[in-house]
Image: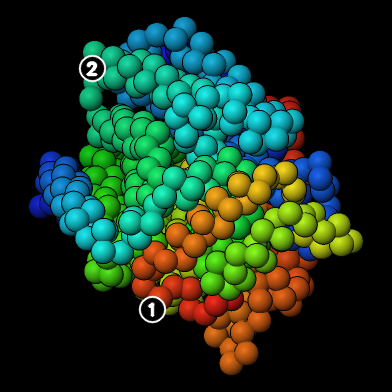
């Protein structure tokens, strides 16, 4: 780089740029937070859904599955599983694990109670109603 | 090595390499589970192996960054570390916390671990990469603060250079953004939104400052190029990293419920994110070409050039491949993401930590460079690990393209598991290539035990 462009000029671009764009990120974040109520389905964030989210976290579901495309890529997307499979299938599936089919990927059994299974279903219903800009591209996730 | 207290870096680097080996072994287990689904089930279910794999990566990179900081900051500040004893105590605290956490994952069901460790008081667990129990998270904060205190006091009382200031700003940023790991709202969209303030603002933000400082430090040492030139490059590179990367966070906000304008902000700014990585490549080659000395540690020079190139390929090119919103709509959450993750972490952060280890370890062991034979073995390990990681990335990319086609684009989309069966061939190829990577890593470790007369500049 030419000598007309000094180290202190480079330093100023760094500090100035970092501060400016961080403030821009914060401004956009404030705007995002103000728009979220229209999109994030918070009106259906019931006690049962919150319990469902807690079960989702404490069983480390994200260690195999994705939720809105984030997580591990070992097992199916679950953000839209409520629409793909419906409540009864979800409960029966969780209860029926592991399948024990030789050579197939296995999901542990978490010994969830009937109430906890309902919480999971309610959580998945809640996630399926969040506005994700039409993602995933189709029902298969 | 100019100051005795720089030696505290040594245990940090040794622990880093040990945990790296553990990370790769669990990676191989997961790779096999991709094709032999019930392998090691129920002893080590996939989710446990993955937690161990990713958490070990994060912990050993942190060990690497800390070791690098304890080495380079005294040298740059031209004085002894404020408290070598504190650094050593923190090493043992961090190692104990790390090992206990990994054992917890392996030996206790995750829900029980959550119960034992106070997750019902403050729920922070069960989010990707932030799976650590509450005491571990608190431990990370304590270790980070103690380190920052120690390093900041050293710099305050010593010479302030661009390199030690940038390193310090990067580490402060790392600690501050980690605090978001304690914020876990019930609202899933908010949860995900601020989760990225840790994950993205680390790897595509402040970690780039740390990487830049480490690379600049080693380049000054091995090339003898004027500090003014190198520090000017450093500032320009990290300026570009933050200018593009901060708003580039938006490329994670396309499909998680955030407003749709993020598709524009995220696409435009993250499309520019390869620029700082490309500058790093040019920087490394330019400085080595203009070198004023022949450093006897050729292996360190190779790693420095390698990290420049591979960070650009993995973070820059493979990131750009799927960062534009219309493309990401199809690739999001597929094996393409996994491909990018592997090459980016290896090229940028694994390789820059090894660059630092490669340069400093011989000095801490009392010689300018290792024996020619040890260096040849180390350079073989460079090529084995680097080339195999490129192929792992290519195979995962192939798997990803096929997966996306079958599951998301074709006229008759098939289910996730049916698509996985179709791409199994690529998972097998990835697994075999992983064994070559392991061979490279074992060779790398063995290079530390090769004796012989230290190499001299020719």
In the rendered image, residue A21, in percent from the top left (x then y), is placed at 18, 52
Query: Where is mark 2, residue-wise?
Result: B156
Could you say whether the residue bearing mark 1 is in a helix, strand or loop?
A: helix
Residue A82, relative to residue A17: is it above or below? Answer: below
Tell me if residue B260 can be seen: yes
Query: Where is mark 1, residue-wise?
Result: B326
Residue B151, relative to residue A80: is it above or below? Answer: above
Look at 73% across and 66% down and name the residue there.
B427
Tell me if residue B441 can be seen: no
In the rendered image, residue B280, in percent from the top left (x then y), is placed at 37, 53
Nearest-to-viewer mark from 2 and 1: 1
In the rendered image, residue B279, in percent from the top left (x then y), is placed at 33, 57
Look at 66% across and 31% down and name the residue there.
B112
Between B221 and B338, the one lying in front of the other is B338
Contact check, label 2 and label 1, Cβ < 8 Å: no
Rate crowding at label 1 as few (under 14), some (14 to 19) or many (20 or more) other CA atoms within 10 Å. Answer: few
Q: Is residue B212 left or right of residue B388?
A: left
């Amino acid at each position: 780089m030419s000598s007309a462009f000094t180290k202190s000029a480079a330093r100023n671009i760094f500090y100035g740029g970092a501060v400016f764009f961080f403030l821009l990120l914060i401004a956009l974040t404030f705007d995002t937070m103000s728009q979220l109520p229209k999109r994030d389905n918070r009106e259906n964030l019931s006690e049962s859904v919150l319990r469902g989210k807690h079960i989702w976290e404490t069983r480390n579901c994200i260690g195999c599955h994705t939720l809105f495309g984030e997580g591990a890529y070992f097992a199916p997307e679950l953000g839209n599983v409520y629409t793909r499979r419906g409540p009864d299938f979800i409960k029966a599936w969780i209860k029926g694990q592991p399948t024990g089919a030789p050579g197939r990927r296995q999901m542990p059994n978490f010994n969830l109670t009937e109430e906890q299974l309902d919480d999971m279903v309610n959580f998945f219903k809640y996630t399926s109603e969040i506005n994700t800009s039409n993602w995933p591209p189709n029902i298969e996730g | 090595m100019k100051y005795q207290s720089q030696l505290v870096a040594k245990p940090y680097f040794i622990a880093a390499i040990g945990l790296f080996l553990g990370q790769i072994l669990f990676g191989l287990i997961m790779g096999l589970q991709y094709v032999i689904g019930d392998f090691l089930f129920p002893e080590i279910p996939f989710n446990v192996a993955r937690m161990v794999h990713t958490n070990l990566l994060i912990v050993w990179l942190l060990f690497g960054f800390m070791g690098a900081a304890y080495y380079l900051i005294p040298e740059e500040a031209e004085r002894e570390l404020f408290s070598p004893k504190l650094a050593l105590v923190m090493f043992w605290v961090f190692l104990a916390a790390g090992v206990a956490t990994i054992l917890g994952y392996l030996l206790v069901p995750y829900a029980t671990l959550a119960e034992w460790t106070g997750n019902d008081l403050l729920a922070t667990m069960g989010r990707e990469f932030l799976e650590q129990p509450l005491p571990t998270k608190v431990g990370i904060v304590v270790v980070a603060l103690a380190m920052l205190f120690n390093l900041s006091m050293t710099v305050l009382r010593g010479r302030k250079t661009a390199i030690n200031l940038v390193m310090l700003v990067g580490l402060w940023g790392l600690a501050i953004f980690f605090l978001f790991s304690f914020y876990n709202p019930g609202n899933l969209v908010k949860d995900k939104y601020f989760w990225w303030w840790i994950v993205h603002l680390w790897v595509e933000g402040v970690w780039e400052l740390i990487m830049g400082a480490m690379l600049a430090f080693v380049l000054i040492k091995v090339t003898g190029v004027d500090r003014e030139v190198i520090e000017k490059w450093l500032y320009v590179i990290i300026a570009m990293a933050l200018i593009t990367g901060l708003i580039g966070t938006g490329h994670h906000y396309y499909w998680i419920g955030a407003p749709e304008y993020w598709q524009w902000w995220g696409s435009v700014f993250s499309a520019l994110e390869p620029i700082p990585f490309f500058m790093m490549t040019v920087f490394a080659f330019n400085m080595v070409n203009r070198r004023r000395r022949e450093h006897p540690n050729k292996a360190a020079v190779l790693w420095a050039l390698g990290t420049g190139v591979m960070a650009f390929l993995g973070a820059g090119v493979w990131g750009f491949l799927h960062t534009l919103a219309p493309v990401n709509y199809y690739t999001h959450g597929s094996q393409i993401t996994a491909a990018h993750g592997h090459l980016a972490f290896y090229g940028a952060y694994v390789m820059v930590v090894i660059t630092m280890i490669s340069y400093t370890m011989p000095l801490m062991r009392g010689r300018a460079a290792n024996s020619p034979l040890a260096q040849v073995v180390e350079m073989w390990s460079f090529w084995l690990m680097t080339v195999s990681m490129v192929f792992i990335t290519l195979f995962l990319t192939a798997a990803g393209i096929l997966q996306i086609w079958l599951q998301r684009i074709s006229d008759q989309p098939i289910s996730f598991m049916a698509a996985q069966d179709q791409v199994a061939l690529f998972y097998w190829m990835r697994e075999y290539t992983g064994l070559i990577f392991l061979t490279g890593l074992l060779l790398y470790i063995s290079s530390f035990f090769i004796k012989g007369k230290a190499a001299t500049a020719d």
